[in-house]
Amino acid sequence: MRAATGEPRPVRAALILGALAWLALVILLPLGAVFVEALRGGWAAYRAAVFEPDALSAIKLTLLVAAIAVPFNTVFGVAAAWTIAKHDFRGKDFLVSLIDLPFSISPVVSGLIYILVFGMQGWFGPWLREHDIEIIFAVPGIVLATVFVTFPFVARELIPLMTAQGRDEEEAALTLGAGGWQTFSRVTLPNIRWGLLYGVLLTNARAMGEFGAVSVVSGHIRGETNTMPLHVEVLYNEYNFVAAFAVASLLAGLALVTLAIKSFLEWRHRDALAAAGH
Amino acid sequence: MTITIDNVAKTFQAHSALNGVSMEVSDGAFVALLGPSGSGKTTLLRIIAGLESADAGHILFGGEDVTDRPVQNRGIGFVFQQYALFRHMTVAQNIAFGLNVMKRSQRPSKAEIRARVEELLALVQLPGLGERYPAQLSGGQRQRIALARALARDPKILLLDEPFGALDAKVRRELRGALREIHDRVGLTSIFVTHDREEAFALADQVAILNGGKIEQYAPPKDIEAAPATDFIREFIS
């Protein structure tokens, strides 16, 4: 039987196969290649590449940077989205564009900005040197660059959601005697938790994977200022393909784990999600 | 509780929403604010509630000046046009919200809160719906829950913004009767906003007709019909 609004069977089959083939070519194949190449030298070579001291220090640095950038941008993103979506003030459009700025400029430029401001020849360079504060070619610079690049994810995710939800529920909470913090924690936050989770996961993925901006400010000091993506590049440039793909597979694995967590949470809370009408 | 509105004015970005409005609502009265859209009726209601601040003038509850008192401390119940139920909470949690956010020293016990929720569900004639989520209710049921939630803390004043605006005619008539009955039984002083002349005249003891940010006439429905004060009113009620 043919559905009233469907396409003929051959057309449907062709469309589905075409979509699957494209998906396989641009997403599954490269992802698979990472893991295949990583294990080409066998399990022992994989372990050796991952547990080598420079690799371990790159993993630690990446996790440290994410552990600082993600909470910071989560708090900032929620505050910014709340200010923009629930209040009227002059210069709102300007603030929205400002939040988008890191998306619209190249990551390399984002990194260069920090060199120009904090680098040796930069505005604050001499002052920082006098006070023995290292920012560029050190961990603080990497954190700053990552925070800058991942700035918009949470806010961008939440602004449309919070705007669509309006202010009615917050006002209702106020008329029922709730204070500002109670209103935020009991009404605003629960209403945005899924959008927030998604924004946090995106922020985390980008924080761990950022290459361009971090590459400019890091200085590529092995075992000190190399994050995982930078370490992969260094290994690759040294023709150490097995090790490069082994570390890359770890990065890809972290991304897959976050995706799995998100799917699991959605599955566990499917009833609440359906009831809330998401 | 009496409500005194004394020369209240409000301007939004160059255009004025209210130009010196004064009126007196006596204890136990059921008053309608009636007018075309843009007449300032919703703004006035929100100023009485404390959701909006007046640029000039005073609001008094029972003779006490509450102009600078924040909405949380005014002891009012407010029913929103689109109900504004908390979508992530069950009906029972919605109704209990006002009690659950009270300071620990004043908050009733869990058992008392549960009993109060049951009592309110019975009052709005929806017993047994406590475990549902707002998305699982019809429009009329949501409106009743919004009313129950607004009454949880025993307000003396109930404010309603277009309470029946989003409902069909049959449900609207049922709810009107229910609202009037609850108003009388609980002993509230109520003000509701509407643009529906028939609804205002059928339900309210006193009707204030607003136009262009001013009250054109404030009187019982019968008096307005018998003696319209201005040409605008004559046209508006015909």
Image (cartoon, coloured by chain):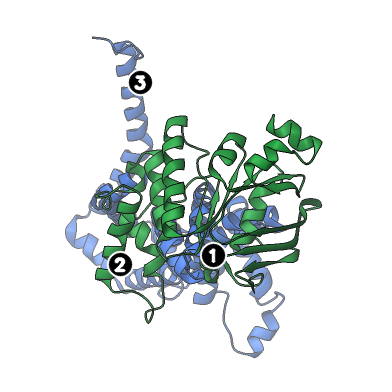
- Up-down relation of residue A269 to residue B202 (above or below): below
Callout 1–callout 3 Cβ contact below 8 Å: no
From the image, tell me which residue sits under label 3: A15
Crowd rating for badge 3 (residues with CA inside 10 Å; few <14, some 14–19, many 20+): few
- Provide the secondary structure element on which disc 1 rests: helix
Secondary structure under the numbered disc 3 in the rendered image: helix
Which chain is home to disc 1?
A
* Residue A137 rendering spot, x and y as whole percentages: 54, 74
Residue beneath the point at 48% across and 68% down: A177
Q: Tag 2, which chain?
A: B
User: What residue is drawn where x is 42% and y is 52%?
Assistant: B182
Q: Quadrant of residue B45 in the image? A: bottom right
Residue A11 visible to an observer of this rendering: yes
Q: Report x, y in % for residue B119.
A: 30, 58
- Horizontal relation, residue B211 to residue A142: left or right: right
Specify the chain shown as blue.
A
Counting residues from the N terminus, which is met first, the one under dot 1 or under dot 3?
Answer: 3
Letter of the green chain: B
Residue B198 in the image, given as x and y percentages of width and height: 58, 34
> Which residue in the structure is indicated by mark 2?
B113
Which residue is under mark 1?
A: A79
Q: At 37% from the left edge and 79% from the top edge, which residue is drawn?
A: B104
| Picture quadrant where residue A111 is located | bottom right
Quarter of the image with the C terminus of chain A is top left
